[in-house]
Amino acid sequence: MADKCQVSELHAERLKFKPVLPNVLKKGVASVKPVFGKATKSIADYDTVKSIFSHTYGMPVVSFQSGSNNAVSKKTVNIGVVLSGGQAPGGHNVIYGLFEGLKSANRKNKLFGFLGGPSGILDNKTMEINDKVINDYKNTGGFDMIQSGRTKIETPEQFAQAKATLLKNKMDALVFIGGDDSNTNAGLLAEYLKKENVPVNVIGVPKTIDGDLKNEHIEASFGFDTATKIYAELVGNICRDVNSARKYWHFIRLMGRSASHITLEVGFKTQPNMVLIGEEVLAKKMTLSDIINQITEVIVKRSEMKKNFGMILIPEGLIEFIPEMKELISALNDALAEHEDHILTLKEIEEKRDFILSKLPSKLSKLMQSLPLDIACQLMLDRDPHGNVQVSLIETEKLLIEMVSEKLKELKKAGKFNGKFSSISHFFGYEGRCGMPSNFDANYTFALGYNAAALVLNGLSGYLSSVKNLTAKSQDWKCGGVPLTMMMNIERRKGKEKPVIQKALVKLEDRPFKEFAKQRDKWAINDCYMFPGPIQFFGPASVTDITTKTLQYEQKKK
Ligand code: FBP
């Protein structure tokens, strides 16, 4: 915190918080032993994934148990750490836990941060992380200790560059803190280094507020708990305003690039009148006009009860779940990748749009022309380095408001709507990504980092740090590692087939969605709003230590 001399009162208190480690890690990394399970397979496309990861495919799941393992203390190691992708509350505590884990084995072990995300590896920008740095940043939100970035290490030159940096810095391992795309990249780097006989191991840590990096071994990605608590506070406050002013419909888009986990969780915490779930839209093959009809139906029903107000939550990834839009975006991805050089020569956005329209099949070209210009242009914005559409920049809430208003005008003309419709749009995204981590995330991230140190010091590579049993007290969490290749399949990215960690979407057959489906009709008509208030760090455990409703439903704790 070189350039910051003052901290807030709460910040000062949080610096004193001591994360509680799972019992198995409490005595230090030299007191845990890895236990190996059976050989594993990728989730699909076995042969293709195996051929790409011939050195790291099929490794067993690892779990840690108490036991003496003094071998890990013998050698002194240099470990690099990098934050990759979007910010998520708790990133600093992963580094704090990693630091403490490494030092528990040997005080001479050193930790270095690569600055600015994976580009820091390519450009060899490092900083040593010492006690002073840790003391300044522990339990704080943000990634500002070493910053993050979305550079993807993908070309042969970049892999060679990464290898050169790691060797130059005499690194023994690299810890990659990232989401599904970043950890796919970590898996590819682990494979490359093994193939090149470079003795540098790579371990991933599951980060993303989106909550879509999860499976049997990764119960939650870190940051989801805090971010959803922050959004729920904001949405709850608007629920109170809605219920007080009784004159506006609030359309709130919430972050979460693909999956609708954030929206579902915030829905549970605040019980607004409508919660759109992208995965349901896809499963029911709903068109944009089906969605508009569904929304207007609720608006009309409420207006008949003299309730010209309400709240709708919209996941930012909704647009990609509407089958016709999904088809359009996929065709746009291919066309933008194929004609990248020519598009770069075009200056005006309208020129680019017209050029792209000429490259699309006529059905999709018509659909694109039917969209408001703003939205059509937003759909053409640059993809991120992993080939993703930047949905955080697409104002779906405004698109829905525009279309709902038109529909209500038609209904009014036909004498089927006599109410009023005044709307306000919001987007909550960046507000939630750097918040002070909740007690849950502060403990979870510390454990993930400490556990990553155990994986690294046991010489493992190509694994993701796994801490489970998350609805229990943190002392009872279970630790280990899951092979990155086990979570992979083949998907189309930037017009090409690529191995990627499969995103965990909201499953309609799972308990969280089913619980929501049971309650939503009541929420639509009655005003069942809930007001969760701000994250509590001190006070009764019933408010300071609760996990997400999603996890509680998934683990049948509710
Ligand atoms: P990660 O998957 O990298 O954690 O990022 C998630 C996210 O916050 C999404 O919810 C959002 O759509 C996106 O990042 C925004 O990206 P950017 O930070 O590049 O604006």
Image: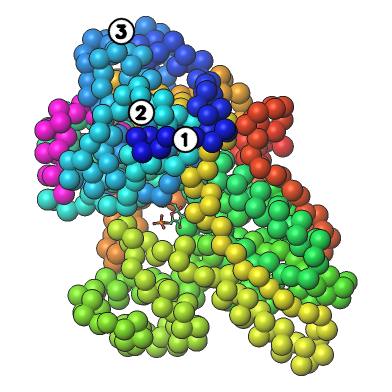
Comparing marks 1 and 2, which lies closer to the viewer?
1
| Residue for point 38% across, 20% down | 100
Is residue 399 within the magenta segment? no
**Distance between the alpha carbons at the discs numbered 3 and 1:** 42 Å
Please give left or right for residue 386 compared with residue 122 in the image.
right
Please give left or right for residue 64 compared with residue 515 in the image.
left
Kindly identify which numbered label has been placed on residue 133: 2
- Element under label 3? loop
Residue found farthest to the front: 5
**Residue 242 on image: x %, y %:** 76, 62
Residue type, label 3:
Asn
Q: Earlier in the sequence, mark 3 or mark 1?
A: 1
Residue 349, above or below 302 = below
The count of marks equals 3
Q: Is mark 2 within 8 Å of ligand 1?
A: no
**Residue 49 on image: x %, y %:** 28, 47
Is residue 175 within the magenta segment? yes
**Distance between the alpha carbons at the discs numbered 3 and 2:** 28 Å
Quarter-of-image position of residue 83: top left
- Element under label 2? helix
Comparing marks 3 and 1, which lies closer to the viewer?
1
The part of the chain drawn in magenta is: 158-176
| Residue for point 66% across, 85% down | 406
Is residue 202 visible in the rendered image? The answer is: no
- What residue does disc 1 label? 6
- What residue does disc 3 label? 70
Residue found farthest to the right: 305
Mark 3 touches mark 2? (CB < 8 Å): no
The quadrant where ligand 1 appears is bottom left
| Residue for point 32% across, 49% down | 149
Is residue 3 visible in the rendered image? The answer is: yes
